[in-house]
Amino acid sequence: MTSLLDRTVAALRAEHDTLDGLVRTLTDEQLAAPSGAADWTVAQVLSHLGSGAEIGRAPLARAAGETVAAEDNKTIWARWDASAPRAQAEGFREHNARWLAMVEALTPEQRSSLTVDLGFLPEPVPLVTALGMRLSEVANHSWDVRVAFDPDARVDAGSAAVLVDLLTGPVGFMLGFLGKPAELAKPVSLAVPGAGLVIDDAVTVAGHLEAPSATFDGPAEAFVRLVSGRLKPPYDRGVTVEGDVTLDELRRVFPGF
């Protein structure tokens, strides 16, 4: 059976290839178009992903035993922010490919044993957690780019399935940042594709719910967009929720980033 980590790496590769292929075709006018991320152009989304890949490569390289010179994150962000849209797009292609090549070159032993100090968490995390966090970012921001040109765009189905599994374990702690359970007046247990969402004093995703109080009727990719605050009109067509909570209430729990 393919491990969750290997599935995550495969999803990251698929996401890169899809977005890289699209970016190659974009005109300067398209790069300046509004994206699915509020207040960001397409080029700015690509800049965010590219700078994230540049910053994220250093802790992975250190975990693998390389000596890497430190560079202040603010300096990196400033450089990317000052770049022209075309340079931001090409920079994404270069740096994300470089980051991914390093990940794919890790040996099976490294994949199973490495822990990564990301710098902003209390302690180093297993590799699957670090890569899962990156997949969440890439999959959602890829949608931000693609929906600028296709209103029917969806988060990649393969990535969505992996992300649901990741939310039940290695990246479940992210729900503490993404969810605002106090927005609901009472606890809710929601059946979602491949898992169950529990909202009480906290927000958690479980592998299965015996007796959910509500049901999310939509694909896994729609649930992923709900959690990231991207399941909003007009991009919520065909998605319904039945039971003791409404889709609008769930959107308040997950305002997005």
Image (cartoon, rainbow, N blue to C red):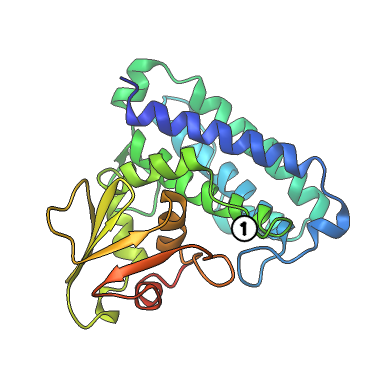
Q: Quadrant of residue 185?
A: bottom left
Q: Which residue is mark 1?
A: 144
Residue at left offset 46%, top offset 56%: 222
- Along the horizontal axis of the image, is 170 left or right of 231? left
* Rendered residue at 59%/42% (across/down): 54
Give whichever of 101, 245 is nearer the camera.
245
24 sits to left or right of 171: right
Residue sitting nearer the eye, 53 or 168 = 168
What's the amino acid at mark 1?
A: Asp
Q: Position of residue 83 (x, y in %)?
A: 78, 56
The reply, left or right, for residue 187 in relation to residue 101 is left
Q: Mark yes or no: residue 64 visible.
A: yes
Q: Is residue 182 above or below residue 19?
A: below
Q: Position of residue 186 (x, y in %)?
A: 18, 79
The answer to whether residue 84 of the structure is visible from this angle is no
Residue farthest toward the left in the current orientation of the protein: 210
Q: Residue furthest right?
A: 28
Please, is residue 29 above or below residue 97 in the view? Answer: below
